[in-house]
Image: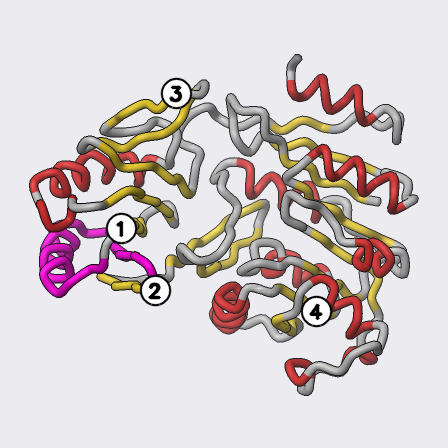
Amino acid sequence: MNKFYKFCIELKAYTDIKPTIHLSPATGYRARSEFGFSKDSYTMVKDGKKIHMNISSIPHSSIQEIMPKLLFKIKKSEIMNKKLFQINFRSSGSNVLATLIYHRPLQDNWTAETREIQNSFKNLSIVGRSKKQKILIGEQDLELTCNYDESSFKILQNDLVFFQPNFYLYPLMLLFITNQLEKTKDLLELYCGCGGFTLPLASNFNKVFATESNKHSIRLLSQSIKINNLLNIQTARLSDDETASALANKRLFKRLEHINLQSYEFSHILVDPPRAGLSEETINLSKQFKHMIYISCNPETFLKDIAKLDRKILSIGIFDQFSNTNHLEIIAFL
């Protein structure tokens, strides 16, 4: 059954509103891609079978350009090839970060060989990783400039944090949200990551309090806030349940010593949880807010949470983040 049709049928149990559907190109859309490495080739699983390749049409063109060239150099180097089992790519649209993951410790000769290879590219940085080890050749943080509508902002990311995977749909997701915002005061954002929604939405609110449990994401977001000269965002490294406990005054956190939560007048809560969906404590917290924006990467848990939230769906969009797969991204105003 068509994945869009399937979700729309299931959605009818909760609302008569028809979702808007935003399609993605089938090629060149991925800002980040992960591949296995075996028999001197990139590998991925398709229809339950492992396939070998020198290049994939799915990643952004900047990644596609580097893939065969980097593979050629790895194949020629016994040092780089030995016990390499995974290669991940990320792109800012111009610069690329490649993470090479090994089943062995990396020695000085790997560093020297990799540095020579990295110097042969103008726009490539390389991270080598093995158990409890990381070696960086070049710049670890990628700076992406995102333009949408008449707005623009810069955001930092690296291979340790989540970032929206679809170059084409990301600006459309931002527009879907900003075009529907009204009666805004302050925003509480949970699962903020490195700021993919925090940064562009800040100008629509008086103040933003954004929380995230990943320390690397919070570091990058703090740097991006400075790069964009934004003065109305405060961040804290808190999980969803810790945020709920802090707002309910159930627990004091040293990480919040510099933040006065009582000074906020929240009108909206935005949540972008992992595939497991919202915790019970987060669901209870959300009921204190008049307006809720729910971003979901899992339609199944989204519908389960909708039943628990006891909220009316005001609008909903479907975003085909991973073309030609069963995955869907949902944004709903509740």
Q: Which residue is mark 3?
A: 49
Q: Which residue is mark 2?
A: 132
Instruction: Look at label 3 and name its amino acid.
Output: Lys
Q: Earlier in the sequence, mark 3 or mark 4?
A: 3
Give how far across and how far down residue 198 sits, in percent.
Answer: 62, 60
Instruction: Look at label 4 and name its amino acid.
Output: Phe
Determine crowd level at label 3: few under 14, some 14-19, many 20+ residues with C-alpha closer than 10 A.
few
Q: Which residue is mark 4?
A: 209
With respect to residue 57, does 248 lie above or below? below
Query: How far is mark 1 from mark 4, CA to CA?
Result: 38 Å
- The residue lying at 70 percent from left, 81 percent from top is 253
Asked whether 107 or 254 is in front, the reply is: 107
Regarding residue 228, the answer to whether it shows in the image is no
Q: Which residue is mark 1?
A: 102
Magenta-tinted stretch: 105-131
Query: Which of the two discs, 4 and 2, sits closer to the camera?
Result: 2
